[in-house]
Image (cartoon, rainbow, N blue to C red):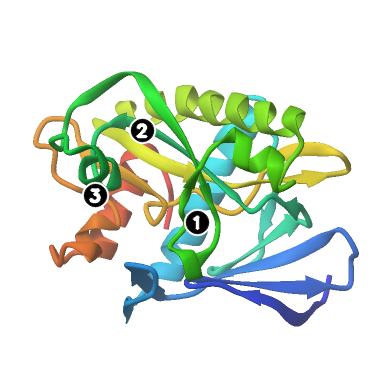
Amino acid sequence: MNKLEELFRGKAKSVYNTDEADRLILLFRDDTSAFDGKKIEQLDRKGMVNNKFNAFVMEKLEAAGIATHFDSLISDQESVVKRLEMFPIECVVRNITAGSICRRLGVEEGKDLNPPTFEFFLKNDDLGDPMINEYHIQSFGWAEAEHVEKMKQLTFEVNNVLKDLFLEGDMLLVDYKLEFGLYKGEVILGDEFTPDGCRLWDKETRKKLDKDRFRQGLGGVIEAYEEVGKRIGVEF
């Protein structure tokens, strides 16, 4: 497989075409951003850590019967993935209150949510990824009703698998976002699952082990990512 031109450049990843029509190369860069790109830094080792972390989690999900776009690691910072027709939607599950839900609803951080909440957001940086609902999705044609139901189903299946995985490492999966796309007509998990896109706390101390360390200027961002990975068995 040969890596061709850059197809898309996000805030922390780049996507490249290949000479295989249904495969892409995903490059995890050392770039780190928050607040819709208003805070940006380069953090040494971040691309490598997130690439290997993502591969480990995707393989765990595949083993649990959840289809993903991940194929294989090809370098410290690159993976081969299936080419998906992505939905412009983020699916967010919250097990514990943190972040924007606290600001929007005026609730304190750290409240256990039973059942977990589910939210849709439109993937649009210029608009600040606004919250949307199923009526918006249908009216604007962002996804078919059957695909919306499948995304919801898969997002909760991921929750069941990963809550247990992180608990084995004495961590709480606070919340996370997922993105999905179509591959040969099937809805499958795309994008990534790393501490960039979820919140993870130590079970006993509730120490933050995710990108909130960067957002809140707590320091030790990559050290925290590596700690999370090592607790669940990732080899860096």
Up the image or down, 127 lies above or below 111; here it is below
Marks 1, 3: nearer the viewer: 3
In this picture, residue 82 sits left or right of residue 189: right
Q: Residues within 10 Å of mark 1 (few under 14, many from 20)?
A: many
Q: Is residue 44 visible?
A: yes
Q: Percent position (x, y) of residue 175?
A: 35, 38
* Numbered disc 3: secondary structure: loop
Q: Position of residue 223 (x, y in %)?
A: 24, 61
The residue at the point 82 percent across, 45 percent down is: 183
Picture coordinates of residue 90 (x, y %)?
54, 47
Identify the residue at horizontal 22%, vertical 23% (top origin).
112
> Residue 29 has which mark?
none
- The secondary structure type at the circle numbered 2 is strand
Local packing at callout 2 (Cα closer than 10 Å; few below 14, some 14-19, many 20+) is: many
Q: Earlier in the sequence, mark 1 or mark 2?
A: 1
Q: Quadrant of residue 151?
A: top right
Q: Amino acid at mark 2?
A: Arg
Residue 169 quadrant: top left
Assess whether mark 2 and mark 1 are in contact (beta carbons under 8 angstroms). no
Mark 1 is on which residue type?
Lys
> How much space separates mark 1 and mark 2, taking CA atoms?
24 Å
Quick one: which residue is furthest to the left in this view?
205
Dot 3 or dot 2, earlier in sequence: 2
- Numbered badge on residue 94: 2
Residue 169 appears anywhere in the view: no
Pick the front one: 137 or 217: 137
Residue 86 in picture, x, y percent from top left: 71, 53
**Residue at the disc numbered 3:** 209
Q: Quadrant of residue 75?
A: bottom right
Measure the C-alpha gap from mark 1 to mark 3.
17 Å
Residue under label 1: 52
- The residue positioned 43% from the left and 62% from the top of the image is 128
